[in-house]
Amino acid sequence: MKTTLSLSRPGLPRLAIGLAAVLLAASYAGLAASTTQAQSDDADGSLRTLSVSGVGRVMAVPDVADIDLGVVEQSKEAAEASQKAAASMDAVVQALLGLGIDEKDIQTTNISLNARYDWTSEPAKLVGWEASNSVRVTVRDIDMVGNVVDTTVEAGANQVSGVSFRVEDPAAAQEIARASAVDDARAKADQLAAAAGVEIVGVVGISESGGDTPQPVYLARQEMAFAADAGAATPVLAGEVELSVVVYIQYEIA
């Protein structure tokens, strides 16, 4: 059944006006609530922040050196190559112990055995085997580094891949670097805040990364062989190492 409302019926205009008034009031109430919520969100919103990084560097005199030493031996038989490398490394280790190096400061880093081929023939022909054995030696007396290299080369080491220097206990130097990094970060933040026309009002968070950076000194095998033949001591200069700290700071701005 279909019902039709006639606008000419008594009281209908007043009803329509009343409904319109109610809807309009509800609309204003919703708008007011929405405005209040937006203002509340703005007042309680996330902080305005400025994030920067700072770097602190300190130069320090190293007191520890790490030396990578090795032996490489070749033979037509795999077992013989391996045995020759083992014997040569044993002689190197005994030489290190004879210099007063503690056994705990000698660590094996690599043992390998590889086939050697003549690639000029077709197919490639197996011509022998190559065995290698490497150790890392920690020298706690910097003045001994050159002597350690010379003595181990004389004992049979034919691989010296590098010497790296470090500070065994970097805590004091890192403390200075850390303070310098924070000062560096604040200087950057002040500059950025001034340029942007804002003010730093606090610190929201700080994180840190970094550490000492060893400086390697590479010694070529030919140079060591020449020094050994000539009876000259290998000169090793420790210089200084750089210890660095990086901080990331988030400042609150207003």
Image: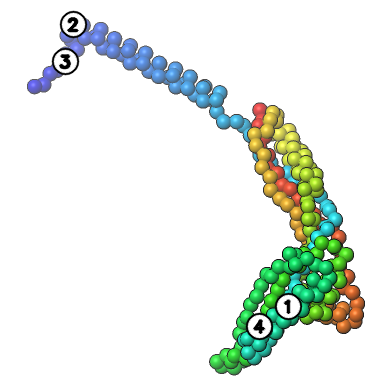
For residue 89, the mark is: 1
Camera-nearest residue between 203 and 61: 61
- Looking at the rendered structure, the kind of residue marked 4 is Ser
Q: Viewer-nearest of labels 2 and 4?
A: 4
- Looking at the rendered structure, the kind of residue marked 3 is Leu
Q: Which residue is mark 4?
A: 82
Residue 21 higher or lower than 238, as above or below = above
Secondary structure at badge 2 equals loop
The furthest residue to the left: 1
The Cα–Cα distance between marks 1 and 2, rounded to whole angstroms, is: 116 Å
Residue 90 higher or lower than 120, as above or below = above
Is residue 30 left or right of 233 when viewed as pictured? left
For residue 5, the mark is: 3
For the point 40% across and 16% down, the residue is 29
The answer to the question of whether label 4 and label 1 lie on touching residues, with beta carbons closer than 8 A, is: no
For the point 55% across and 28% down, the residue is 45
The Cα–Cα distance between marks 3 and 4, rounded to whole angstroms, is: 108 Å
Secondary structure at badge 3 equals loop
The answer, for residue 57, to whether it is visible in the render is no
Of callouts 3 and 4, the N-terminal one: 3
Q: Crowding near pointer 4: few (<14 within 10 Å), some, many (20+)?
A: many
Q: Crowding near pointer 1: few (<14 within 10 Å), some, many (20+)?
A: many
- Looking at the rendered structure, the kind of residue marked 2 is Pro
Give the x, y percent position of residue 226: 86, 81
Give the x, y percent position of residue 76: 64, 91
The Cα–Cα distance between marks 4 and 1, rounded to whole angstroms, is: 11 Å
Give the x, y percent position of residue 250: 66, 37
Q: Which residue is mark 2?
A: 10
Q: Quadrant of residue 116?
A: bottom right
